[in-house]
């Protein structure tokens, strides 16, 4: 049989432990003990040995096991305690008895469930009371429990406070949304009332202005737009003049008072609205909204008051870095220039003067759109013509009257009454004419002529300032973002001079042509600061200078006698400096058309030099440039029959070599190149061009040499050829220049081949494009995956490094704690 388990006998329960700090010994107690020492002798007679022996019987049991045994015994006592009835009595010590009307006493009772909950909640405390002293484990558990309870309470308090804050925020948001909705409805109601009856509801404008000053952005934007719609509708078609003090003192009717009140309220509200728009324009949040409202208001009512303020804001933003704002302002200024009937031309004069002042203050460093708007101006040329004066008309009338009087002397006898009547009729007629002029919208011709002359002077002053600034511009000048080169205003300035060249005074023509000659690359004055100014210009800008010089010459052909040889020389050299990706092909095509193709007789040497250089040029550059050059070559060969000798394949070139026997391709002057001694061998190479349009054009030019008497008609210009064959458009083969064969069978075979082969080529081309697209998509997807993997790896390395650092930090912190505990 196994060894019997030794029964552990627990010692008797000790009284509850009381701390020494809690024991209070009074003087009376000490006196009582001293007086009754005989009664306290049993304390000295206690058998402490037996007591300690009985207590230390369970010394061999571990401390934790002893504590668990105490807890078990306490639980048994509580579980064995019988609870009679549905309720248990409260301890009489803890509660006072209650006396009934019969005189009986009883103690208060609590329900069974409440007692169970109370027992369970206070189980730990009861056990503590039953045990003499808490162990370390119980102390730790109790401390942990108290800490957890404290944390829970803190969390619950925080949650309650956070929930309350969130509820307050939600309530505030709801109230703010309701307020915003009410403001929106209020704006709609006020706006509708104003549009329905503006005279009686004119005071609502101030309320709408107050709403538009709200802190919410949506309300501000809605208020500004609502006011814009209202002002566009109710602003009258005349400028409002407020009455003077004398006029206010005068007695007027009720209708006049009502009209004065209406106009003054409207004008004050309109002024506040304009000031509000100009003020919030400085804020980036409301920049676009305010500029849009200003532009719309100016284009809708340019005749009304405070036009100068609106126009100043528009012109100020015409050089904005924001594309939306700049385009809005430019379109508004253009609408003012086009629709002069709304303001009578006054806004045009003001806008032109403001732009000229802006160009002057910014030293010609503005966006090109700020001067490009001048191209929308239109001038009436008939206003500049002299008109027959009234004096001449009166003299003619007098002469006719004298003649009539000589023929019929007794027709109008000298009568005083008739004279006075006639004078009164003439007076009334003059008054009626004056009133009619004042009431009519048509301006006086002299006034219109004056405004047109002011506008022209400001425009050409701006153009000449830009040209002068470009001449004295150094290479260190900073270029404007988005503009070509370091002269952003030169291209629109040259376009404007070319458009309005017929309105330039002849006294300035010589200076203008000299300036254009210098800008194009030729300087007649040695040691001039602007001698090498062309080095700072692009090829497109220099080509524009040549084009403008020819336009000025063409528009003033009767009054000018200018030699354009220098411009031909510069254009001849600029053809070799042209680069397709860098320079503008449209300007090159325009130069070819104006300088070489427009009904002008050229010298034979010069025409041959241009033909040879353009043929070389067409070999080197793209399709559109090559087609424009070939069209120009064909045109020059049509007009200069002797230049067709370049198509002959003789040993010495053409039969008409001229004074220069040998061709010099590097000569800067076309008259000294000797191009008549060369051969257009480039056309044989162009016949094998990959594009059928270029090959057919080259073969068509080669056939011109076989019959010199044949007449050719030019179908397409260089500009049209460049547009049709540019990279952005589809390739179109010109049908008029194709070679026609006399053999009908060959013709039919060619037609069948073109019909059958082209779809196959197109299908192959499409299939090749699809394959290339697939490969490119795969390639770029792979690259994207690689870059994404690299990014993720970098993030992983960063996180691992941070985690390692954190672990090292924790280890160091633990070591510090250990060292501190050892020191203590």
Image (cartoon, grey):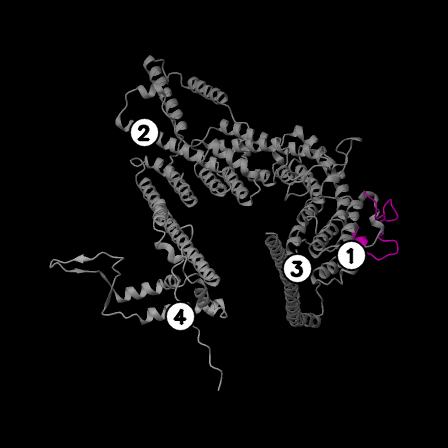
Identify the mark nearer the N-term, 1 or 3.
1
Can you tell which of label 4 and label 3 is closer to the viewer?
4
Within-10-Å neighbours for mark 3: few <14, some 14–19, many 20+: some
Q: Is residue 647 in the magenta section?
A: yes
The image quadrant that residue 14 belongs to is bottom left
Q: Which of marks 1 and 4 is nearer the N terminus?
A: 4
Q: Do the residues labelled 1 and 4 touch (CB within 8 Å)?
A: no
Of discs 3 and 2, which sits in the foreground? 2
Disc 4: which residue:
72
User: Pointer 3: what residue?
Assistant: 734
Q: How far apart are the two marked residues, 4 and 2, measured between alpha carbons?
A: 99 Å
Which callout, 2 or 1, points at the residue further toward the start of the chain?
Answer: 2
Looking at the rendered image, the disc whose residue lies closer to the viewer, 1 or 4, is: 4
Q: Can residue 378 be seen in this view?
A: no
Residue highlighted by disc 1: 705
Front residue of 529/141: it is 141
Q: Residue 806: x and y, percent? A: 61, 57
Q: In this view, does 768 lie to the left or right of 55?
A: right
Q: What's the mark number on residue 261?
A: 2
Q: What element carries label 1?
A: helix
The range drawn in magenta is 643-668
From the viewer's perspective, tell me whether residue 715 is left or right of residue 258. Answer: right
């Amino acid at each position: 049989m196994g060894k019997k388990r030794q029964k552990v006998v627990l010692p008797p329960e000790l009284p509850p432990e009381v701390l020494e700090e809690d024991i209070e010994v009074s003087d009376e107690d000490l006196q009582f003990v001293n007086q009754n020492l005989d009664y306290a002798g049993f304390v000295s007679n206690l058998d402490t040995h037996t007591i300690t022996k009985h207590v230390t019987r369970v010394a061999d049991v571990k401390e934790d096991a002893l504590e668990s045994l105490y807890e078990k015994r306490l639980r048994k006592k509580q579980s064995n305690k019988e609870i009679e009835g549905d309720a248990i009595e409260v301890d009489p010590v803890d509660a006072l008895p209650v006396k009934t009307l019969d005189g009986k006493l009883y103690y208060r009772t609590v329900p069974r469930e409440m007692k169970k909950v109370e027992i369970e909640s206070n189980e730990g405390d009861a056990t503590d009371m039953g045990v003499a002293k808490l162990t370390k484990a119980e102390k730790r558990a109790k401390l942990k429990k108290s800490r957890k309870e404290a944390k829970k309470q803190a969390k619950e308090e925080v949650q309650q406070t956070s929930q309350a804050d969130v509820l307050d925020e939600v309530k505030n948001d709801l109230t703010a949304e309701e307020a915003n909705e009410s403001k929106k409805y209020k704006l709609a109601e006020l706006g509708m009332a104003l549009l329905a009856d503006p005279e009686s509801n004119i005071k609502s404008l101030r309320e709408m202005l107050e709403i538009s000053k709200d802190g919410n952005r949506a309300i501000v934007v809605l208020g500004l737009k609502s006011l814009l719609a209202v002002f566009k509708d109710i602003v009258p078609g005349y400028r409002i003049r407020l009455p003077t003090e004398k006029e206010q003192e005068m007695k007027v009717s009720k209708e006049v008072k009502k009209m004065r009140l209406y106009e003054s309220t409207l004008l004050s509200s309109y002024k506040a609205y304009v000031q509000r728009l100009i003020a919030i324009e400085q804020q980036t949040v409301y920049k676009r909204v305010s500029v849009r409202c200003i532009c719309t208001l100016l284009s809708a009512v340019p005749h009304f008051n405070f036009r100068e303020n609106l126009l100043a804001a528009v012109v100020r933003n015409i050089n904005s870095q924001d594309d939306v704002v700049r385009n809005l302002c430019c379109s508004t200024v253009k609408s003012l220039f086009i629709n002069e009937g709304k303001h009578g031309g006054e806004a045009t004069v003001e806008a032109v003067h403001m732009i000229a002042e802006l160009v002057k203050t910014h030293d010609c460093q503005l966006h090109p759109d700020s001067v490009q708007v001048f191209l929308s101006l239109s001038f009436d040329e008939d206003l500049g013509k002299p008109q027959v004066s009234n004096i001449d008309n009166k003299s003619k009338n007098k002469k006719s009257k004298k003649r009539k009087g000589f023929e019929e002397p007794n027709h109008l006898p000298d009568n005083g009454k008739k004279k006075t009547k006639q004078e009164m009729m003439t007076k009334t007629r003059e008054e009626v004419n004056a009133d009619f002029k004042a009431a009519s919208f048509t301006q006086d011709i002299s006034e219109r002529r004056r405004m047109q002359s002011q506008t022209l002077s400001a425009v050409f002053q701006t153009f000449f300032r830009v040209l002068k600034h470009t001449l004295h511009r150094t290479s260190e000048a900073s270029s404007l973002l988005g503009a070509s080169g370091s002269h952003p205003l030169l291209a629109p300035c040259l376009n404007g001079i070319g458009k309005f060249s017929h309105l330039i005074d002849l006294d300035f023509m010589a200076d203008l042509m000299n300036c254009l000659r210098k800008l194009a690359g030729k300087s007649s004055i040695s040691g001039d600061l602007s001698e090498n100014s062309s080095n700072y210009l692009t090829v497109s800008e220099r080509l524009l200078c040549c084009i403008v010089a020819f336009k000025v010459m063409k528009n003033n052909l009767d009054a000018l006698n200018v030699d354009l040889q220098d411009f031909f020389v510069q254009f001849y050299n600029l053809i070799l400096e042209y680069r397709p990706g860098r320079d503008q092909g449209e300007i090159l095509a325009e130069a070819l058309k104006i300088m070489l193709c427009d009904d002008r007789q050229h010298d034979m040497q010069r025409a041959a030099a241009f033909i040879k250089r353009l043929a070389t040029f067409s070999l080197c550059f793209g399709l559109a440039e090559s087609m424009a050059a070939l069209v120009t070559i064909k045109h020059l060969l049509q007009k200069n029959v002797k230049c067709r000798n370049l198509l002959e394949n003789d040993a010495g070139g053409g039969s008409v070599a001229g004074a220069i026997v040998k061709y010099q391709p590097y000569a800067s002057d076309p008259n000294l190149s000797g191009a008549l001694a060369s051969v257009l061998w480039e056309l044989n190479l162009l016949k094998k061009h990959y594009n059928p349009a270029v090959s057919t054009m080259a073969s068509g030019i080669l056939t011109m040499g076989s019959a010199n008497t044949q007449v050719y008609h030019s179908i397409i210009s260089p500009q049209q050829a460049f547009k049709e064959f540019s990279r952005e458009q589809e390739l179109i083969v010109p049908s008029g220049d194709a070679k026609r064969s006399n053999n009908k069978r060959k013709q039919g075979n060619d037609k069948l081949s073109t019909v059958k082969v082209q779809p196959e080529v197109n299908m192959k081309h499409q299939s090749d494009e699809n394959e290339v697209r697939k490969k490119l998509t795969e390639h770029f997807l792979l690259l994207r995956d690689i870059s994404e993997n690299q990014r993720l790896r970098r993030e992983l390395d960063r996180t691992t490094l941070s985690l390692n650092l954190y672990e090292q930090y924790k280890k160091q912190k633990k070591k510090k704690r250990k060292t501190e505990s050892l020191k203590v």
